[in-house]
Amino acid sequence: MVSPAVSGQIGIEDFLKVDVRVGTILEAEAFPQARKPAYKLSIDFGPDIGVKRSSAQITEHYGLEELVGRQVAGVVNLPPRRIGPFLSEVLTLGFADDNGAVVLVTPATGVPNGARLF
């Protein structure tokens, strides 16, 4: 049974089109040109995908110094999106907390960069 809070069911075929992978943040820097507080991230998604860049609104829960080396989940098959002067190549995934601040999606245990979500 589908919860009333869930709208727009999709088939498994549609879900499998979304390529969610794990990567390790190599660099994190402030993004003062963004309309909402954000960081610019460089994320290593392994040898098949490589290093991709992402803009992420994660400033409430994370400082720049604690992001490098952290594994995160990201959608790697969306078209790039220009955010001001920055080209974001992947969508870094997170959940909103009670105040709307983003909490990153991360694996509970380290996995190889590029591992796919199933």
Image (cartoon, rainbow, N blue to C red):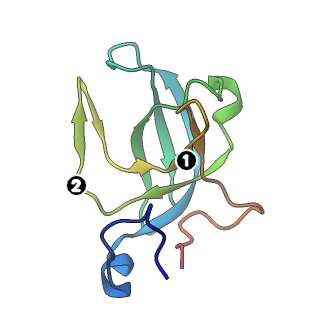
Name the residue: 59% across, 63% down.
113
Name the residue: 39% across, 49% down.
91
Question: Label 2, on which residue?
Answer: 79
Q: Secondary structure at mark 2?
A: loop
User: Which x, y percent locates residue 117?
Assistant: 54, 73
Name the residue: 30% across, 70% down.
8
**Which of marks 1 and 2 precedes in the sequence?**
2
**In the current view of this chain or complex, which residue is farthest to the right?**
109
User: Which x, y percent locates residue 118?
Assistant: 54, 79
User: Which x, y percent locates residue 62?
Assistant: 65, 29
Name the residue type under label 1. Phe
Tell me if label 2 and label 1 are in contact, CB under 8 Å: no
Report the label total.
Answer: 2
**In the current view of this chain or complex, which residue is farthest to the top?**
32
Give the numbered dot on residue 65: none
Determine whether, in the image, residue 93 is placed left or right of residue 109: left
User: Which x, y percent locates residue 38?
Assistant: 45, 25
Name the residue type under label 2. Pro
**In the current view of this chain or complex, which residue is farthest to the front?**
4
Name the residue: 60% across, 52% down.
105
Distance Cα–Cα, label 2 vs label 1: 21 Å
Give the numbered dot on residue 95: 1
Determine whether, in the image, residue 79 is placed left or right of residue 6: left
Front residue (pair 107, 47): 107
Front residue (pair 60, 113): 60
Q: Quadrant of residue 16?
A: bottom left
Q: Quadrant of residue 65?
A: top right
